[in-house]
Image: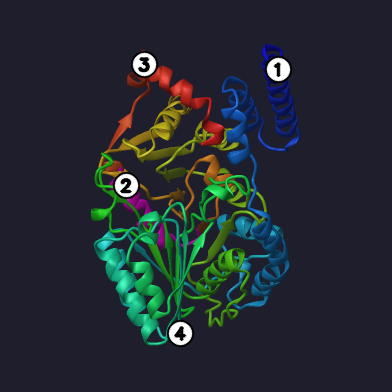
Amino acid sequence: MEKFYHFLTLAGVAVYWLLVVGVTLRVVFQRRAVSVSLAWLMIIYIIPIVGVFFYFLFGELNLGHKRAERARDMLTPFANWFTKLNNCRAHDPKNFGQHIYRIDELCNNRLGLPALCGNTLSLQSSPEQILQSIINDIENAQISVRLVFYIWHPGGLADAVSSALIQAAKRGVKVKLLLDSAGSPRFFRSHWVKMMKSAGVEIVQALEVSPWRIFLRRLDLRQHRKIIVIDDRVAYTGSMNLVDPAYFKQGSGVGQWIDIMVRITGPTVNVLSAIHCWDWEVETGSRSLPQLPVSHVDKDNPLHPIQVVPSGPGMPDHLISQVLNLAINQSNQSVRITTPYFVPSAGLLETLKLTAQRGVRVELIIPQKNDSLMVQWASRAFYAELLKTGVKIFEFYGGLLHTKSVVIDQQFCLVGTVNMDMRSLWLNFELTLAIDDQTFTHQMYSLQQSYIDSSHEVMLKEWENRSLYSRLLEHVYYQFSPLL
C-alpha cells in the first residue's frame, strides 16, 4: 500500500510539473507585453497549483466560444456601417483641429469609424443633475431607450430612473437594458428586475458570472461601458455608473464617488447607439443597427467634433491605448489627467515621463483613498519615478475621484469609461470620447482644477521620506501591476 501511495504521489507531482511546463510554454508563446508574461510566470512558480488555476481563469483573453464567434461575424457588417459615416456631411476632416485629425485617421484606418461634427455637448458633474437629466429625457422618450452599464445599484435617484424606464415601457417605448453580471449583483437580486420585465423592459446580463462558466471564459473580462441612448436623438456617456452616490458603498471608507457624464445630441448619438447594438448582439445574437445620422452641419461653423473610440474583444486590439498615447504625444503645453485607478503599462509610463521631460506640464490627479488597496499601493509604486521627471501628482481627498479625463493643451480632451490600468486599456469593453472643442474642454479643465483645489500635492522630498513599510507594500504590489 505504501508503494501505491508513493506511486500516486510521484504521478501527481509529475502531472503537476507537466502542467506547469505546458502553461509556461503557453505564456511564453502568447504575444503580449513582456512584463505581463513575467508576472504570470512569477505567479505560476511561486504559488503552487493556485498559480496555474489563476492563469486558466484570468491569463488569456477568452470571451467564450459563442460570443467570440458572434464578435468575429459582427465585425464586417458593423465596420461597413461605420465606414458609411465617412460619406456623411458630419465627417469634415478639413475643419478638424490637429489633435482630432490624427485620431480620426487612426480610428478610421483601424475600424472605419470617423470623427463627426454637428454635435452639442453638456458636461454634467453632480449626481443630482446627471440623474435628473436622464430621468427627464426618459420621460420624453417616444421610440426607444438603450442602456448599458457596469453597475446599477438600487437606491435613491437610481430607483427614480428605474421607475421612469417602467413608465416608458408601459407607454410603448422599446427599452433595452444591458448590465454587467459581476458589476450589478444587487440589481439582479432586487425587485426591480421583475417589475421592469413585467412592464416590457428587456434585461440582459452581460458576461454572466456562475461557477460552471469558470473555465469557459475569462472572468475578469467585464462590460465596463456606460451608455444611454434615447430615440437615437440624445445620448449620455462618461464615468458614472447608474447609482446614486449617497446610497452607494457608504461603508467603504473612501467617501462619495465623484463622476461626470456628457449629454450629447447630434450625429455622435447614432454612433453610441451602434456601440450599444454591438454589445447587445454579442450577448444575444440579435442584430438591430441604427439609422445612419442625418446631419445638417454648417460647413463654415462645424460644432464639437467627436471621435467615438470603443474597445473590447472583437474590436481592433489596443485602440484606446493607442489613442491615449497619440493624444499625449501631440501635447505642446499641458496634459492634465484624472483617473481613479492608475497602474500604467510600461508604454504609457514612458509616454508620461517623456512628455514631462520635453517641458510639457503633466499633472496627474488620483484619489487619496481607493476602494482597491492593491491598486492604491501599486499606483504609489510609480510616484517616485514620475516625480523625478517633473510630473506633478495630486491626491484628491474629497471622495473617490472616479472621473476619467485627459485634457491636452486646454484645447482637446478625452472623457469616458477608461481607467489607466491594464484591464481598462487592454481587456474590458470600454468607451472613450475624443472631443475637439475648446469651450467644452475649458469646462473640463476648470472641473479638473476644482479637483486639484481639494487635493494634496505630493512632493518628491516628502515622498522619499515615507516609511519602509509603505515602500515594501508598494514593491510587493508593483510586481503584480501588469495584471491589475
Residue occupying image coordinates x 40% and y 43%? 340
Between marks 1 and 2, how big is the CA–CA gap? 71 Å
Question: What is the secondary structure assignment of the residue under circle 3?
Answer: helix
User: Could you say which disc has been placed on residue 143 in the image?
Assistant: 4
Front of the two marks 2 and 4: 4
Residue assigned mark 2:
449
Q: Residues within 10 Å of mark 2 (few under 14, many from 20)?
A: some
Front of the two marks 1 and 4: 1
Above or below residue 52? Residue 434 is below
Above or below residue 348? Residue 209 is below
Q: Position of residue 362 (x, y in %)?
A: 45, 38
Q: Nearer the viewer, residue 71 or 298?
A: 71
Q: Residues within 10 Å of mark 3 (few under 14, many from 20)?
A: few
Question: What is the secondary structure assignment of the residue under circle 4?
Answer: loop
Residue assigned mark 3:
469
Q: Main secondary structure of the magenta part?
A: helix
Question: What is the secondary structure assignment of the residue under circle 1?
Answer: helix
Q: Which residues are the magenta region?
A: 434-451
Q: Nearer the viewer, residue 39 or 184?
A: 184
Between marks 2 and 3, how big is the CA–CA gap? 32 Å
Residue type at numbered disc 1:
Phe
Residue occupying image coordinates x 70% and y 57%? 110
Query: Of callouts 3 and 4, which one flags the residue occurring earlier in the amino acid sequence?
Result: 4
